[in-house]
Image (cartoon, rainbow, N blue to C red):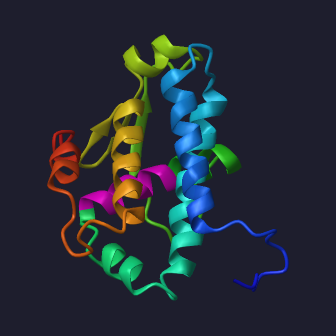
Amino acid sequence: MENKNPINYGLTPFDLYQKLIFEEKRLSSNAEWSSYDFFNFHVTATHLFDDWLKEEKKESQSLMIKIRNTPREMFVVLQVLRDLTNGNKHRKLDNPSEEKRITNISGRFSDGWYSFYFSRFSIKTTDFQFQIWDLVAIVMGYFHWIFDHDVSNTIFPERLIDMILSFKK
């Protein structure tokens, strides 16, 4: 396939998905992980959805159907990641055209596996309250569904919607 973007050196959305898997493995298996690892994870996930998949869906009917069948609650999770990404890259959220989802981040977030799995660090929206690992699990489940060509395009995984709803306030 010809590279239509001369600035891109050949990466595909699937390559970025593989990078997201790499980032998730670093988070879940590295006892010495740092906050950089979570930053890399949410930045990769945000750009995979906001930039790569939105462009790719123009060429993929299957992907377009899956994105169209993504429930509102999953979009809230993706918007939380976007807020985390933009807030940490730019130190503030100031684009008036984007609806902010995060209402509060509480607790102390420090480096190390204990903080990742057991801290009281939480991300709150109007309707939900997530811990870091909850977000990682939901996001990975979503992108597994997006990139799995052997599952239904029209039926969003019930276990994912149940997982998201379990964090409803």
Question: For this rendering, which residue is in front, 14 or 135?
Answer: 14
* Point 28% across, 68% down: residue: 70
Query: Left or right: 141 with respect to 80?
Result: left
User: Over which residues does the magenta segment extend?
Assistant: 73-82
Q: Is residue 99 above or below residue 34?
A: below
Q: Quadrant of residue 15?
A: bottom right
Q: Is residue 155 above or below residue 23?
A: below
Q: Is residue 64 above or below residue 85?
A: below
Q: Main secondary structure of the magenta part?
A: helix
> Is residue 96 visible to the viewer in this orientation of the structure?
no
Tell me where residue 54 appears, x and y as whole percent: 51, 77
* Point 43% across, 51% down: residue: 80
Tell me where residue 56 appears, x and y as whole percent: 54, 79
Tell me where residue 13 appears, x and y as whole percent: 58, 66
Please say whether residue 93 is one of the residues in the magenta stretch: no
Question: For this rendering, which residue is in front, 15 or 92?
Answer: 15
Tell me where residue 143 appears, x and y as whole percent: 41, 57
Q: Quadrant of the C terminus?
A: top left
Q: Quadrant of the N terminus?
A: bottom right
Q: Is residue 150 above or below residue 76?
A: below
Question: For this rendering, which residue is in front, 156 or 152?
Answer: 152
Query: Left or right: 35 with respect to 138?
Result: right
Extreme residue toward the right, this view: 6
Query: Left or right: 151 with respect to 135?
Result: left
* Point 16% across, 40% down: residue: 166
Q: How many marks?
A: 0
> Is residue 157 visible to the viewer in this orientation of the structure?
yes
* Point 58% across, 29% down: residue: 26
